[in-house]
Amino acid sequence: MAATEKKQAVYLCEGCGISDAISLDELEQAVTGEMRVPLCRRIDACCGEDGLAQIKKDIDKGEVTQAIIAACSPRVMCEEFDALGAQVIRANLREQVIWSQPAGDENTQMLATDHVRMAVAKAAKTEKPAAHGPGASSMKLLVVGGGVTGLSAAREASKTGADVVLVEKTGELGGWAGKWSKHIPYASPYRGLQENPLPDLIKEVMGDKAITVKTNTTVARTEGGPGEFAVQLQNGKGDEWDVFGAIVVATGWRPYDTAKLEPLGYGSSPHIVTDIEFEDILSAGLSKKTKKKKSLDVVAFVIPGGADRMPYSSGVSDRVAIKQALQVVEAVPGAMVYVIYEDLRAHGTAEEFYREAQEAGVVFQKGEVISISSDLTVTVRDDLLGGEVPMSGIDMVVISTGMVPNSTDIDREPSQSGADQLKDDIDPRVPITFSGKLVNGGNGAEPDKAADDDEPALPGGPILNLQYRQGPHIPILANGFADSHYICFPYETRRTGIYTCGPVRRAMTVGEARQDAQGAVLKAIQAMRAADESLAVHPRSGDLSYPKINHDICTKCRRCTVECPFGAIDEDPDGRPHINFSRCRRCGTCMGACPVRTITFDNYNPQMVADMIGAVEVPDEFAEKPRILVLACENDAYPALDMAGINRRQLSPYLRIIPVRCLGSVTMLWISTALEKGFDGVMLMGCKSGDDYQCHFIKGSGIAEERMSSVGETLKSMMLEEDRVVMEEVSIADSVRAPQVLNEFADKIGAMPPNPFKGF
Amino acid sequence: MANDKPKGGKSGSGKTKAGEATASDTPDGAEDLEDEFAAFEREAREAAAKAMGTMSGGAAASAKSEPKAETPAPADDTASGEDDQEDEFAAFEREAREAAAKAMGTMGGGAAGTESDAQTSAPAGADPGQAAAEGGKAAVSDEQGEAAGQAGAEESPAKAAATAAAAKTVAAKRKEIFGPRKGIKSQTVLVVGGGIAGITAAIEIAETGFDVVLLEQGPALGGRVTRLNLYFPKMCHPNCGLEINYQRIRNNRRLKVMTMSQVLSVAGKAGDYKVKVRTRPTYTTRDCNGCGECAKVVKKKIPNRYNYGMDKMAAAYLPHEHAFPMRYVIDPGVKGTADAKKLEKACPAGAIDFGQEDEEFELNAGAIVWATGWRPYDARKLEVYSYGHSPDIINNVEMERLASHDGPSGGKILRPSNGKEVKKVALIQCAGSRDINHLPYCSMICCLASLKHAAYVREQHGDAEVDIYYIDIRAHDKMSQFYERVRQDEKIKFIKSKPGHIDIGEDGRPVLCGERTIDREIYAEPYDLVVLATGMEPSLNGSSAPDGISRDEYGFVVDDGGQFSAGVAGGPFDVALSTQSATAAALKAIQAVRGGVS
Ligand SMILES: Cc1cc2nc3c(=O)[nH]c(=O)nc-3n(C[C@H](O)[C@H](O)[C@H](O)COP(=O)(O)OP(=O)(O)OC[C@H]3O[C@@H](n4cnc5c(N)ncnc54)[C@H](O)[C@@H]3O)c2cc1C
Ligand code: SF4
Ligand code: SF4
């Protein structure tokens, strides 16, 4: 890597109006003069064919190892400049200088020069990253759960060339779906009761040489990371271990607690059953049942709504009710079948299945069911008459229940650290939150956080029993689903190399779960490859850089192990941080956490940004030119500012904007450097934090907020105004708002006396 | 251990109560955050100086020493013997050696940390399996693991053996999963359609190590979601995920994007498709750097497609502010006019070329993913709803533009007819969907989109009323919480009814006429704005979709072993389900270019 000597050159782009808006003569003088970069070329258009060729020539001749390109935003022309072969450092003179500043102005020139100074300072402290190695120790997949999702996952992985070990807790494969006598259609023509696909699927799996099935087996503990998960299995056959490249969790669901249906009337008669219990009756054969016990001439399916509406089931239960209603109609000639619902959620192509049931004579009746009595009278609220209407003469009532995700193993005792983890993380008892401000009438207030009682957040112990410093569970969201919080990235579990699928992730039907298994397997295989090649996975996919700790300096304060949003850092028995590289997503939160700044990346480190800040020329207090440091999240705030530039929205010329990997990577050193250097204000711009986070590294912006909460006090003690250092939440769509926020802040800072540390 | 465990940084409550934070979030009770800031002055200089002192040999030195520093166990020679360019066999050997080394506990680095393993690897319970088999409560908490670990400090021989065994297979497996395969003509996957589904499928394939070409017929990626304001249920911005995806594309050399390109025909079979493609001109070359001079001089105005024609824009344009690739497009109508000359002169990069013609060429692909998405169902076909007869009757995609900061009204939801504030808004569900004369299926997203639209209106206009006319509110799985949330707003009313028709009242306002399903009441209600919740129709319908794609009765693509669907091309999905199906399609396509089912 760095054994070779650095040879820098600055390329000043004359294109896109840059040479009209600023004096490149002056800039060139500054580069070769004060910045001491020997080689500075002015290029007609750096990104053009001739321009690229000119730069490449320098590089190929061995004259340049670091090309500092002062042109457009680092968000454009990446492929072109990457292909040059040297390490490329960009100075954003276009979007964030000439497009957002008046041409020919003294301040614009100062801003442009500072951008190049920062780029040159950055070059001195950045290296092309090299892989950490040594690669994966296993390319085998572990699938946990032998229901339809797990079986599908195992087959799909095997079809892609991977070996699989499938563990199933019970003695049998097939899970719940294996028990259903008929299945919901999910492919064209989207109607007709389907045969159970499980027997064939199980046969395929059992006949597949690449798949090892272990029934009566669970995972006792999981160590390591992607490419090297060491997993201890638990099946009474002694100490059994295996090593896996990645893990797919398909532990499915369990029925909703029927006790919660008792107020509705469940339990008062043997003929009031849940939809799951009714499956048994259907499997046993309806005709037999009708002969022996009671007629099934009138059957009512009740899909509770309102307060009883269950997030666990919406959409699935409705389709199950349609299926079962059709089965009754088919098996019992002349039967009257009612489905009583508030909203019939036969969404998507399931509309056709709904239509089929209507054609078959099933009566769908909208209404809120208030009670079901032991004599099977169903009372429905009637909005037309304003009263309650009893329906009697029913032989059997089937109540839709719900699917509670098995994101924990309820047959295991909850552990203290597991309970702590679940509560400290996004508490699964808290309902999904949405931008609260959107509904401003009525009681649109944020839902209360569940009481912080001593009860564990979820029953049961961990499924994988991860030996991670941050706790044994896979992180869990609202209602216990082990799902991603991102709409765009459905497989983000916050534990690298571990992917959930099927009803443990979201309520879904068999057809949907089989597709979900394919998605999870793709991600698992991708994670194994990334681990093998030392590459980061989403969102910094392909990044080779990784955090390094100098253990001679580390004080074992453990902040990095606590704050890593992905649980990538463990502690060794001596209390020293141990980074599991293949778990790491390269956000830099650990770097921002470290009080002695001894966590660094080859191409991103505390000293690098501190030097960039130090490189800015700060005019003295009489110049009336304040300087404001802006540390902007490179994923959202920075692009929003680029877009402001594209729209030619003007920014205060006093801002000095530096993109950061994530606000979580911001170290207090940068703020102190800025203040000591004489900057008059500092603004951190990052993504929404909290339960409804938008931060691509989950907790980065939240952690920054916490770190910042004490800054004001300290500023006061330094006799500086508290509001010189602030943090703002900015989204990528804020191309209008972000410049406003910055300009207002600049005005405010401008109105304050200059930073007294200027010139020291 | 558990008791002195430092509390994790609460990602939860974004807001931190200052005092509390200090108490609960500082890893070491002794230090508080006050120190942290004070520390920076002293520590920063000292530690940094020290760090520079010990590490300044450059990253090379520190990198080399790093693995050693990570684990106390002395690194075996084997670790440094690795070479990037080693061949398959050498790699195999290397792994075997490493595994053996790991098994013996002599190697550190990336391994699961041999030292701590040795400390903690003893099984938790005396007979852990038995409990599970008996269905009793098995206690395998980490605490127990640690406690047990303290007792027996031996490295488990079973684990060592497993590690060694796994390592032996790595090279072979690497080759089997990722290496080239014989007998397959093309191992490239073609993804057609650059919306969120196509982008996702293409990236997931490329990041798994296979070559992809992503074709998009328009000038920029992103598809329909770039024209949405916010996503339900999180109310977050579509560009947020797209930006990450564009970064992933920029950083991946296996993925090639071709815009302005459409598939003309497909021939062949899985593993060997020949695809004819036509690329239309943008009249700008790759020298266009997005400076926008052309847009300043062009006179011609055209309907703004990005805003569904709700306003006009210059005929030389950037598709939108977040366009990827960021390159201007010149409308074909400019060619040959006086504007054309002006443009050529104005472009400082000389990037305008009216000599460009349609180009046709052939691509080879082993598998094809159709991610061609959808178009809003044409509301003019619903004649009774008078779409097109009043500017105040719009469809739901237009509503998204009205609410967007870069939409025709700068994000203000105002009456399109007169720019006045909206006080009363009607949202009509199932406009075209669930109707055998139009779209027989339920489009799945329009209920949720309308809930979102109600929220848009309510956020902007504190006293506006929103009436939602619906058959069923289909809020599937976790969306039901979103529904519950919106229902709490008493100014949002849910009226079960499918309106019969819309009249234009004397004051020009649209008047909704129909009968309520529940109380049979007849209504004729005037509104300031009516939004038709039109559904999604597969974009391959009614277009010149190439032959040879299996499609169902609605026009959705059906997988056939070599061609697959992702996103709404395969069914009416929201974004979460589209990206899920795209990830699944990525796997299926990879399987297909690997020779299919084994
Ligand atoms: C009003 C409304 C609001 C919505 N709001 C939300 C929401 O808040 N949250 C949510 O999750 N979902 C929402 N949706 C659904 C969401 O828009 C879709 O799930 C999403 O757009 C699907 O993406 P796609 O990639 O499948 O399709 P598209 O976005 O349509 O992308 C398809 C791409 O393929 C291109 N293409 C088409 N044909 C060809 C061809 N022959 N050759 C080459 N390229 C081609 C198109 O130009 C386009 O770029 C909403 C839908 C509507 C109608
Ligand atoms: S905090 Fe971020 S960079 Fe540090 S180890 Fe964790 S994932 Fe990696
Ligand atoms: S989602 Fe709602 S509005 Fe759309 S078709 Fe389905 S039921 Fe109708």
Image: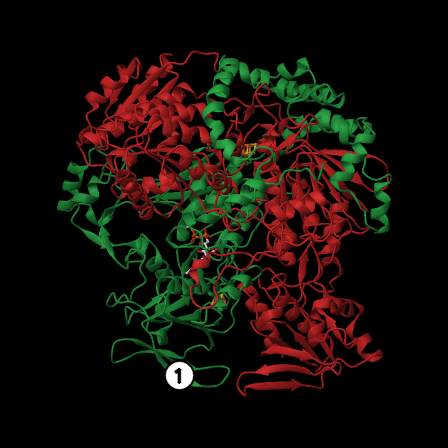
Chain colours: A red, B green
**Residue A498 vs residue B150: left or right?**
left
The residue where tag 1 is placed is B523
Pinpoint residue A40: horizontal percent, then vertical percent. Answer: 28, 17
> Dividing the picture into quarters, in which one does residue A388 lie?
bottom right
What residue occupies the far bottom of the structure in this picture? A385
* Foreground of the two, A364 or B519: B519
Tell me if residue A546 comes above or below residue B450 in the rendering.
Answer: above
Residue type at mark 1: give it: Tyr
Residue B536 place in picture, x, y as percent: 44, 61
Q: Residue A580, located in which quarter of the rendered image?
A: top right
Q: Residue at x 58, y 78 (%)?
A: A367
Q: Position of residue A226 (x, y in %)?
A: 63, 34
Quadrant of the rendering where the C terminus of chain A is positioned:
top left
Answer whether residue A40 is visible to the viewer in this image: yes
Q: Is disc 1 placed on a helix, strand or loop?
A: strand
> Relative to the observer, which residue lies in front, B434 or B162?
B162
Quarter of the view holding residue B598 = top right
Image coordinates for residue B166, horizontal then vertical, percent: 73, 29
Q: Which of A745 and A87 is in front in this view?
A: A745
Q: How many marks?
A: 1
Left or right of B264, for residue A11:
left
Image side of residue B9 versus residue A152, left or right = left
Which of A663 and A638 lies nearest the eye of the viewer?
A663
Q: Is residue A652 above or below residue B473?
A: above
- Residue B281 appears in view: no
For disc 1, the chain is B
Give the quadrant of ligand 1.
Answer: bottom left
